[in-house]
Image (cartoon, grey):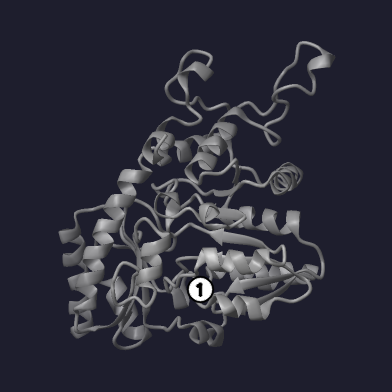
């Protein structure tokens, strides 16, 4: 099956339903009765360990990333924590992209370092920087591509080849691209990670995370920790994500079309210093984006001429773009990474990777793009004034 067919049908086959449902029902039961002691360990027992609705979602998630296995968690950070707890121990070392979501860096630097896990941040746009950072105790390479918020890219295939020479696990956070535009496992990654809060759910009404893998041993370790630690996605949230995934393909096509129009508009605006969008030929990794992605996504960032004061004035003047964190919903969102999504990253670290006070991150929704551009003009008028 091709992508849209899988998104709609996998995990929700009518012949697998008790009453022939064409939509997976929500199984809210926390526990499952047995007819005899012999059946106690058969089938579903307790919903933390396994739930029919969550299982249906996990099958669908795996199908989207061309994976053997999918696991659903209560948030993207819960998924990240499970990967780290399941696969690493005290003294292990991770090489990570220097441009990461602020919450991921907070998890790394303020939580996991307390348990003896070591981190080195490199500019992974150059694969050799990853090679040069490898130590004897390196166990994992952690990438976002495109990154949050500067839309930097890592060559997944090249990094995976370097890592696998030393049996190092490669994790790719694929949230920005979505499975519709990029499939890291096909490019050599070992684990693909998503915040399903974003494009997979797509409607800003569910918080969740997902991990997809092909390796049997990695899956078994992750599955054990999913149950043992218990950061599972609820049945109702699982159902909401399944509902959102059904329209993922058509949503992503509209997100990208709108983002491209807006990126070109911003690139020509006299009050814009720079635009970060992989779909623009001016993006330094545009050719890499064309090779490893099927499309360029709905996320972009730009630097306004001026500083934080002008950036605040800009975002506070908009009416259609909601001033809000998160991304990937049908509605357009706008935010200032320096004081919102990446505020937990110290200022000197932010500026070192290029996150300036004038940087504005945009999650382009699926509204009429002419309305979005007119709304952005209000922001520029406010800055001019």
Residues 145 and 17: in front is: 145
**Residue 206, above or below 109:** above
Name the residue: 45% across, 81% down.
Answer: 355
Name the residue: 19% across, 54% down.
Answer: 368
- Where residue 383 appears, as percent x and y from the top left, is 23, 82
- Where residue 272 appears, as percent x and y from the top left, is 26, 82
Q: Is residue 116 left or right of residue 96?
A: right
Res. 142 in view: no
Residues 313 and 65: in front is: 65
Q: How many marks?
A: 1
Residues 21 and 122: in front is: 122
Secondary element under disc 1, as helix, strand or loop, is: loop
**Residue 323 appears in which quarter of the rendering?**
bottom left
**Residue 138 appears in which quarter of the rendering?**
bottom right
Res. 261 in view: yes
Name the residue: 49% across, 86% down.
Answer: 351
**Residue 28, above or below 156:** above
**Residue 206, above or below 15:** below
Q: Is residue 150 left or right of residue 17?
A: left
Quadrant in which the C terminus appears? bottom left
Q: Which residue is mark 1?
A: 342
Quadrant in which the N terminus appears? top left
Label 1: few (<14), some (14–19) or many (≥20) C-alpha neighbours in 10 Å: many
**Residue 8 appears in which quarter of the rendering?**
top left
Residues 61 and 356: in front is: 61
- Where residue 135 appears, as percent x and y from the top left, is 74, 76
- Where residue 150 appears, as percent x and y from the top left, is 43, 74
């Amino acid at each position: 099956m091709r992508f849209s067919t899988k998104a709609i049908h996998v995990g929700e086959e009518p012949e697998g339903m008790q009453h022939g449902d064409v939509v997976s029902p929500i199984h809210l039961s926390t526990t499952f009765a047995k007819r005899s002691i012999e059946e106690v360990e058969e089938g579903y027992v307790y919903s933390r360990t396994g739930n029919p609705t969550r299982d249906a979602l996990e099958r669908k998630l795996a199908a989207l990333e061309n994976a053997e296995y999918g696991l659903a968690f209560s948030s993207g950070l819960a998924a990240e924590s499970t990967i780290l707890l399941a696969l690493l121990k005290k003294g292990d070392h991770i090489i990570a992209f220097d441009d990461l979501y602020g919450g991921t860096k907070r998890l790394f630097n303020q939580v996991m370092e307390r348990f003896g896990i070591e981190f080195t941040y490199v500019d992974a746009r150059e694969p050799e920087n990853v090679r040069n950072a490898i130590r004897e105790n390196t166990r994992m390479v952690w990438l976002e591509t495109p990154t949050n918020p500067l839309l930097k890219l890592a060559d997944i295939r090249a990094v995976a080849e370097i890592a696998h020479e030393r049996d190092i696990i490669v994790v790719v956070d694929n949230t920005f691209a979505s499975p519709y535009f990029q499939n890291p496992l096909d490019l050599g990654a070992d684990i693909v990670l998503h915040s399903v809060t974003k494009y997979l759910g797509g409607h800003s009404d569910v918080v969740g995370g997902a991990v997809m893998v092909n390796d049997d041993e990695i899956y078994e370790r992750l599955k054990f920790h999913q149950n043992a630690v218990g950061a599972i996605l609820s049945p109702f949230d699982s159902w909401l994500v399944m509902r959102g995934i059904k329209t993922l393909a058509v949503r992503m096509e509209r997100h990208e079309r709108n983002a491209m129009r807006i990126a070109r508009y911003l690139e020509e605006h006299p009050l814009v210093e720079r635009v970060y969008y992989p779909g623009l030929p001016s993006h330094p990794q545009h050719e890499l984006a064309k090779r490893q992605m099927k499309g360029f996504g709905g996320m972009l960032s730009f630097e306004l001429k001026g500083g934080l004061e002008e950036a605040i004035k800009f975002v506070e003047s908009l009416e259609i773009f909601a001033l809000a964190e998160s991304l990937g919903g049908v509605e357009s969102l706008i935010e200032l990474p320096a004081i919102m999504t990446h505020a937990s990253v110290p200022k000197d670290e932010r500026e070192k990777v290029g996150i300036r006070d004038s940087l504005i991150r945009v999650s382009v929704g699926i509204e009429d793009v002419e309305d979005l551009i007119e709304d952005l003009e209000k922001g520029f008028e406010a800055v001019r004034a």
